[in-house]
Amino acid sequence: MVDIDKISKMMKNCLKCLLVLSVLQTASSDSCSLEISPSRVVVAFGEPVTVSCVASRPVRVLGWESAIGASHTQHDLSVQWQVDSLIDWIEEPICYGVFFTAPRQCEEKLNLVLYKTPDSIAISLVNHTGPIVEGREYQLLCEVQNIAPVQYLTLRWYRGQVEVYNHTFSELSPATPVQVSSTLLINPSRTEDGAPYRCEAALELGPEGPQPPPKVKSEPISITVHYAPDPFSPEQEVLEMIGGEGIVLNCSAGGNPPPSYSWSSTDLQDSDGHQPLLTAPSSGSYTCTASNLLGKSSKTFIVKAKSKGV
């Protein structure tokens, strides 16, 4: 008589064995048994590079698949990929192994970064000639020629020694050298007259790259800001003149271009001597006007006579 319960139990045990075997095979196939050292390599264009690939179990064939520097060995547990001068921008070396046991074939791709600092970096004003006027908006352009890989580039803008903006290019992914640019909007004030602007390209290649990151700076461009004469404060000043000695009035004002000066008074003919100093010969009201192409500013001096000894 056939023992149905016994047969059912044996089938369940077989299913368990098949399940365990499937899990073991999956775990084994997930392990490639290859290790690349170093796992990430950063190399300057034209420089040499050497990378090892090591198998952790017996291997029939171990090698590197590559357009340059391809190599293989039989039965040895390690093999090197070596190039005297790396100049191939699309190189993607792969270490492969053919094993005696499952998984019988597997491969690991080298994380390789080939970089190049820019040929040049320059800064300029966009679509503008002539003076820069306070209160107006202008655009500066920084151009970087032949840099790679651009996704590791950070372009920083400086006014003097202060960083005012930075631009990254992580959305771009070409491996070959490219030209990129960045713009900076400025609205300069008189306090920034003569301030130098510059841009700096830095390749931030991670801990495996050169430290500190390679940087290339542009020549600075100095911004000369034109502005109207500074407003006088106070706009009116009372002075005392002792006896008949006269008194020197000074209405010097900042401005760019430097302002010219004119004086007027009830007791003085209009003067266009372009000088900020005037010797008032007597009491009265004297008005000075400082002006340039962008505007003007005025100040009035009230001169009162004072007797000696009073």
Image (cartoon, rainbow, N blue to C red):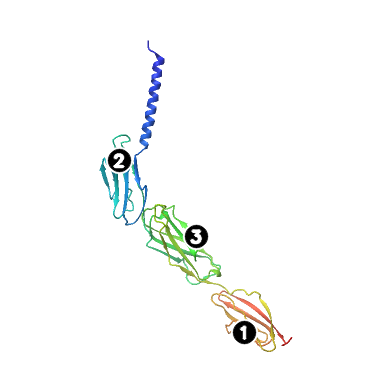
Is 223 displayed left or right of 249 in the figure?
Answer: left
Residue count near mark 2 (Cα–Cα under 10 Å), binned few <14, some 14–19, many ≥20? many
Q: Position of residue 8 (x, y in %)?
A: 40, 18
Residue tagged 3: 165
Given this view, does label 2 or label 1 mark the residue nearer the observer?
2
Q: What kind of residue is marked 3?
A: Tyr
Residue 27 image-quadrant placement: top left
Q: What kind of residue is marked 1?
A: Leu
Q: Look at the picture and state if 85 lies above or below 25.
A: below
Residue tagged 1: 278
Q: CA distance from mark 3 to mark 1?
A: 47 Å
Residue count near mark 3 (Cα–Cα under 10 Å), binned few <14, some 14–19, many ≥20? few
Whether residues under marks 2 and 1 lie with C-beta atoms below 8 angstroms apart, the answer is: no
Whether residues under marks 3 and 1 lie with C-beta atoms below 8 angstroms apart, the answer is: no
| Residue under the point 50% across and 60% down | 165
Q: Which is nearer the eye, 288 or 110?
A: 110
Is 108 displayed left or right of 271 in the figure?
Answer: left
Q: Tag 2's secondary structure?
A: strand
Q: CA distance from mark 2 to mark 1?
A: 94 Å
Is 268 displayed left or right of 88 in the figure?
Answer: right
The quadrant the C terminus occupies is: bottom right
| Residue under the point 38% across and 25% down | 17
Mark 2 or mark 1, which has the lower sequence index? 2
Residue tagged 2: 97
Q: Which is nearer the eye, 133 or 104?
A: 104
